[in-house]
Image (spheres, helix red, strand yellow):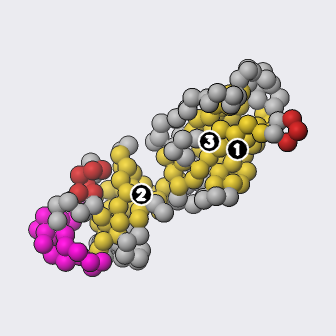
Amino acid sequence: MGTPVAPAAAPGNPLRLSARQHVLVGRAVPVHGVLAPAQGGRAVLVQASRGRRWKTVARAKTRAGGRFEAKWRPSEARHYGLRAVLAGANGAAAVRTLGGGVTAYRPAAASWYGPGLYGQPLACGGTLTANVVGVANRTMPCGSRVRLRYRGRTVVARVVDRGPFAAGREFDLTPATKQRLGFGSTGTVWASRAG
């Protein structure tokens, strides 16, 4: 899964925020925070973005100790910015953005291909070598970037080839991608669009 990250509060910013940064689509992302100095009953908006527009995805109220928690379920496999907003007096607001944001993934069956094909042309251009970080996919446009996660390791790779041609598999990993992920021969990776 992911590790909660809690950035240090900037001078003058009363909010702290933490959340799991790697999740599967449809699963709840627990969002935790604290308001300092502690005040209970304050409304906090949890907002997510897929670019520059922020959308409120959850609401919470601070407890007596200033802590708050909310849950949000990402609906798409992609990277999101995440922040907490505390409304203040006269329209002022305190905002805390989660460093690194949250990436939501979907499970995808994968395999790998490689050494016997070194020197062969790739369907998207170039030649397969031991250093090519990429994946083969049947339908994604050449050059598309995909973020893959496997057992706590994450790699961003481009679609460089067509395949796999085994039933039910979505990605064939190049040897460099396989090595960076610590992937075996076949299995399930988490996949997300990477921009």
Q: Tell me the residue that label 3 is attached to.
A: 97
Residue shown at 30% from the left, 71% from the top? 160
Amino acid, disc 2: Arg
Q: Where is residue 14 in the image (x, y as percent from the top left)?
A: 70, 28
Q: Give the mark nearest the N terminus, 1 or 2.
A: 1
Q: How crowded is mark 2: few (under 14 residues within 10 Å), some or many (20 or more)?
A: many
Disc 2 secondary structure class: strand
Is 191 situated above or below 64?
below
Mark 1 residue crowding within 10 angstroms, few (<14) / some (14–19) / many (20+): many
State the residue position of label 2: 147
Q: In this view, does 3 lie above or below 182?
A: above
Residue at (68% x, 58% y) in the render: 53
- Residue 114 lies left or right of residue 136; in this view the side is left
Q: Give the range drawn in magenta.
A: 112-128
Quadrant in the picture for residue 52: bottom right
Instruction: Tell me if I can see residue 98 in this picture.
Output: yes
- Taking 116 as reference, is 67 left or right? right
Q: Would residue 169 appear left or right of 130 to someone viewing this image?
A: right
- Which residue position is annotated with label 1? 46
- Was residue 126 drawn as part of the magenta stretch in this picture? yes
